[in-house]
Amino acid sequence: MTRFHWFDAYFAVVGVGVAVFVLRTASSPAAGWASAGLLGGIALLYVLIGRRFMRDEETGWRGFAYLLGAFACYVPAVALVSGASFALFALCPQCFMVLPARFAVVATVLFTGTHVANFWIVDGDASVLFGELVPMALVIVTLSTIFGTWSQRILSQSDERAELIRELAASRAEVARLGMLAERQRLAGDIHDTIAQGLSSVVMLIQAARSDPDRADAHLALALDTARDNLDEARALVAALTPALLDGRSLVDALRRLSPSLAVSGPVRPLSTGLDVVLLRAAQEALTNVRKHAAGPASVSLDYGASLVTLTVCDPGPGFDPALSPSAGYGLPGMRARVAQVGGSLTVDSKPGAGTTVRVEVRA
């Protein structure tokens, strides 16, 4: 997640800063390099092990093992150069990132107490110890506990929201799928009850005309009437499926009503009603997403190629990662299914911060 990159950068800045401080304040070069090397060991543990645990909601014993390794490097580093204790600015937050709050507080106390104990052993000045170091350690522990538990709660709520969004997106896709299935079943029933039965009647009447020449004219006349009725039924079904924007308008006119800045290239030619409906619905869905998510107007283009008609909708919005959230907030499952039904293809080109381009291609 993006938030962990910020932690990586913060820990790197703290680590480099503490290492430089240790080398400059050490009593001898050997002690300085030894202490810096131990701090480097903590950094290596973090890169190889710790940072992965901080992305895992259930670290379990592994979190304790990582902090135990860091503690084993931290104690001698502080013993060599007391200034190594500034590494607490990185270690205390990590305690709350890999452990539950109650254990993180204990770990913070241990890390903070190391510096106090080292001063008591090396210097033994009680006035400084209890007048400065102990109060400072208490402040560090208190602030770490407050901000650590607050951060844990915020991150937990963020993860819950992300999971809820994923569930809502999945539910939306399922509702769209069920809606399409119900619509298909309704259309299948309408076609069966009207056109299919009418065609069956036409077939039977023609067969009757062939088997009974004396009444052939009557059978054929009835078959003709039945065929005309079925043609009217088919036209009514098509009209019911045709969007209002296409009522008496071409696809180009309908798209211009959605986006007055529509750019059209190639020789315009009439398409089938099914293709017109698919392209118009795709444009409507894409432009709806632009209004919801984008920061500015979208550009819409319609290209009539030799064998393909391509609709492109580009927006300057925040973008998203299609691989991570292929359906969140963009209605892509329904669009893909509708385009696939006419043998077309839908592609989405987007990445965070770079806008989104939706491209629909159909053969025509």
Image: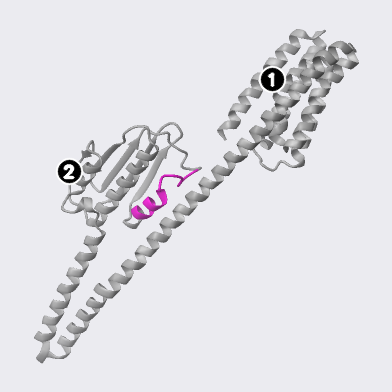
Measured in 3D between alpha carbons, the distance from the residue under mark 1 to the one under mark 2, in whole angstroms, is 64 Å
Extent of the magenta region:
325-339
Compared across the picture, whether 96 is left or right of 354 comes to right
- Amino acid type, mark 2: Pro
Q: Residue at x 66, y 40 (%)?
A: 56
Instruction: Work out whether 229 lies above or below 142.
Output: below
Residue 309 appears at what percent x and percent y? 26, 46
Q: Is the residue marked by circle 1 packed among few (<14), some (14-19), or many (20+) residues within 10 Å?
A: many
- Amino acid type, mark 1: Gly
Compared across the picture, whether 210 is left or right of 17 comes to left
Q: Is the residue marked by circle 2 packed among few (<14), some (14-19), or many (20+) residues within 10 Å?
A: few
As rendered, which of 86 and 37 lies closer to the eye? Answer: 86
The picture quadrant where one finds residue 342 is bottom left
Under tag 2, what secondary structure? loop
The picture quadrant where one finds residue 209 is bottom left
Residue 5 appears at what percent x and percent y? 59, 29
Q: Residue at x 58, y 44 (%)?
A: 160
Taking the magenta stretch, the answer to whether it contains residue 235 is no
Colour theme: one colour
Under tag 1, what secondary structure? helix
Question: Quadrant where the N terminus lies?
Answer: top right
The picture quadrant where one finds residue 225 is bottom left
Label count reads 2
Label 1 sits on residue: 15
